[in-house]
Amino acid sequence: MSDSLIAITGDDFVLVAADTTHTRSIMVVKESGEDKIMELDSHKLLAASGDNGDRNAFCQYVQKNSALYRLRNGTPLSTRALANWTRRALADALRKHPYSANLLLAGYDASPTEGKPGKVSLYYIDYLASMQQLPFACQGYAGHFLLGLLDNGWRKGMTREEARELLDKCIEQLQTRFVLGAPKFAIKLVDKDGVHVIESADA
Amino acid sequence: GINAEYGTPPHLTSTLNKQPNRFIMSIMEYNGGAVVAMVGKGCVAIASDKRYGVQAQTVGFDFEKVFRIQERTFVGLTGLATDVQTMASKLEFRTKLYELREERQMTPKVLAHLLSQLLYEKRFGPYFTEPVVAGLDGKGEPYICAMDLIGAQELAKDFVVTGTCTENLFGMCESLWRPDLEEDELFEIVSQCLLASVDRDATSGWGAVVHIINADGVRTRHLKTRQD
């Protein structure tokens, strides 16, 4: 809950931001430098919040299975397929060995699959494995501060600059009003050219 | 259905503070939602809200809770969103398998029994969802049925409801429903029942979808509602 993840989609890109702190209860293990946005493959990002161990383990699990599919079938999974796979993995684990990881999965698909329009998609998957495709999303307490701001500022077909501006406003809000507002956010973008690191998690 | 006072989702239980917290909800109210199904003359209607929320926070407005499982049979599921999605997925799997083997559609009555079995098999660790089945059988006869989270079926000749505002829905349906409603009237009445009920429930609403099923097909309409 204390990790903040924010993602904003445009027509052909998705901007994903995550705080870079690693905390444990009341202690700050690491104030910045923790990269919570994993690159699943050339055109997909998985941002995760939650307990550090579960977050890392589950993200790696998704990443390696995505790679396995690509090796076996000669083609990568579409974002929608991978999101559904991820949801199912979390749902199956829920009543056996649950992962407390909240996710935002963003991806670019070169050819829209299964009749779904649009080239980019963003999926919000919470730790109970309920999933929604959304134009913008937040995980953690960040949502309480930012969903109103995003409702107001987001428009379909935003440019990268507009999205970045909106994201900066969001980060500023968290740093001003959120008691756990992190000093540093990592920002990554995914579009037709792949994953771009806009702001590195490293200091 | 039974009064399911199941525990709260883990991240809301406090190990330090044992005082009652008015923000903690039952697991069935965590996501919220409402579904209603009604019988008309040679047709059935099934409707749901579209809110996807986490307690007081609304996250999405596109979360339809009614799934077209067979040509003329819909299943509406409320309760914990993850289990709504899991059950819908399981049902799709089982009905597709049935279609492959039997080379025919599953009738709503059979689907309801299948659903009941799937729920009861998890009797001591259930799926937190209370479904509603609505459809037309092979002869065009309407069929509706509701279930609690462990699969106890409730057949009805008039209407069935499920979700976080069942009291509201029961009141509205009891007042407005009458037998042998034509399609257009049925649509009006189902819509009014749903809207008036979810407007008084904080965790339901944010849009609505209504499906009218008759012998010729299905008409789907999305309603413009209060976005709060």
Image (tube, rainbow, N blue to C red):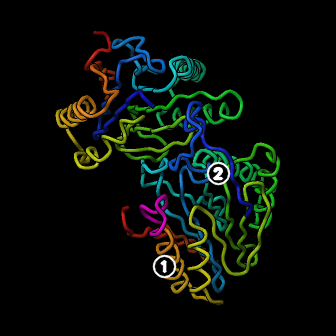
A190 in relation to A80, above or below: above
Q: Amino acid at mark 1?
A: Gln
Q: Chain of mark 2?
A: B
Question: Which quarter of the image is occupied by the N terminus of chain A?
Answer: top left
| Residues at marks 1 and 2, CA–CA distance in whole angstroms | 26 Å
Q: What's the magenta bit mostly, secondary-structure-wise? A: loop
Element type at mark 1: helix
> Chain for mark 1?
B
Q: Evaluate whether residue B217 shows in this view.
A: no
For marks 1 and 2 on the same chain, the one whose residue lies earlier in the sequence: 2
Depth check, front residue: A122 or A58: A58
Residue A178: image quadrant is: top left
Residue B29 screen position, x and y as percent:
57, 54
Can residue B204 be seen from the camera position used here?
Answer: yes
Residue closer to the observer: B189 or A3? A3
> What's the residue at 49%, 68% (across, down)?
B198
Dot 2, crowdedness within 10 Å: few (<14), some or many (≥20)?
Answer: many
Point out residue A171 in the picture as x, y percentages from the top left corner: 25, 30
Query: Residue at coordinates 81% horizontally, 51% vertically from top-left?
Result: B120
The residue range painted magenta reads B199-208
* Residue B88 image label: 2
Residue A41, image x and y in percent? 44, 20
- Give the residue at mark 1: B192
Q: Is residue B201 magenta?
A: yes
x and y percent of residue B112 in the render?
Answer: 76, 62
As drawn, is A120 to the left or to the right of B200? Answer: left
Q: Are marks 1 and 2 on the same chain?
A: yes
- Which residue is located at x 40 percent, y 22 percent? A37
- Residue B163 lies in what quarter of the image? bottom right
Q: Is residue B13 left or right of residue B140?
A: left
In percent of the image, x 64 and y 29: which residue is there?
Answer: A98
Above or below, B143 relative to A21: below
